[in-house]
Amino acid sequence: MKLHGRWLTGVVLATTLGLSGCGYNEFQRLDEQVNANWSEVLNQYQRRADLVPNVVATVKGEAGFEQETLTKVIEARSKATSIQATPELVNDPAAFQKFQAAQGELSGALSRLMMVTESYPNLKANQGFQDLRVQLEGTENRITVARNRYIKSVQEYNVLARSFPSNLTAMAMSYQVKSNFTVDNEKALAAPPTISFDKPATAASK
């Protein structure tokens, strides 16, 4: 009985050391880190989504403001918030790409909106709108920081999942490579096009 107990203890110890040596503990640490950073990304995106209705409502009160620009912001926010951003999303490349595209569209729509508001003196003089603008800009900065942290943590996780011998542990434990942001593509989505301010300026000056 004692020999059996020692043998079992030895097997458990060998298994534990083997898992540790093949990156099991590191997978656990990095997975937790990825999930924590992903949660922060979602928090900042939600913060931005919560600010949008107030921004739209303030701009909407400006006489002659471009309705098409407002409509695009409203539609982009609706699309972005309609995607259920769960922790599992990072393990579904197609869903993750769809999520990123929706957030990129909202970034672009908001960027265009801010550009157009520059030609409306009343909005530039509106303290409430300026406060919202500062909050929005601060949130965009926090999104960038949170996303960069997520990108770094996923890179570390994916390197471990692809490297030998930890890739054997990944296969044995079904640890999949996680989806990551394609920063260049998102920047392209968010980049505002060239806009002519002639029409808004005329409307604002009446």
Image (cartoon, grey):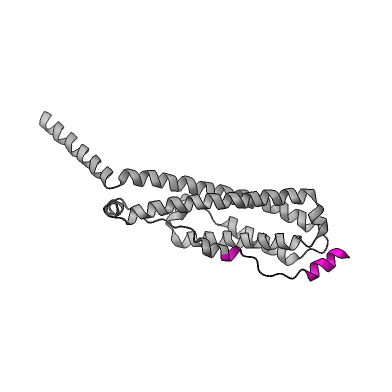
Residue 86 visible to an observer of this rendering: no
Relative horizontal placement of residue 116, taking residue 22 as reference (left or right): right
Is residue 166 visible in the rendered structure shown here? yes
* Relative image position of residue 6 (x, y in whole percent): 14, 32
How many labels were placed on the picture?
0
Q: Nearer the viewer, residue 131 or 38?
A: 131
Residue segment shown in magenta: 188-206
Task: Report the side of 144 relative to 30 (left or right).
Answer: right
Q: Residue furthest right?
A: 206
Residue at image x 79%, y 56%?
123
Question: Which percent across, then down, holds residue 143?
Answer: 57, 51
At 38% from the left and 43% from the top, the residue drawn is 29
Tell me where residue 72 appears, x and y as whole percent: 67, 64
Q: Quadrant of the N terminus?
A: top left
Point out the image quarter for the C terminus: bottom right
Q: Which residue is drawn at the image coordinates 68% and 63% (left, top)?
A: 112
Q: In this view, does 142 lie above or below 3?
A: below
Q: In this view, does 43 lie above or below 94?
A: above
Residue 198 falls within the magenta-colored stretch: yes
Q: Residue furthest top?
A: 2
- Vertical position of residue 7 compared to residue 129: above or below: above
The spot of residue 41 in percent (x, y) is 53, 50
Residue 151 sits inside the magenta stretch: no
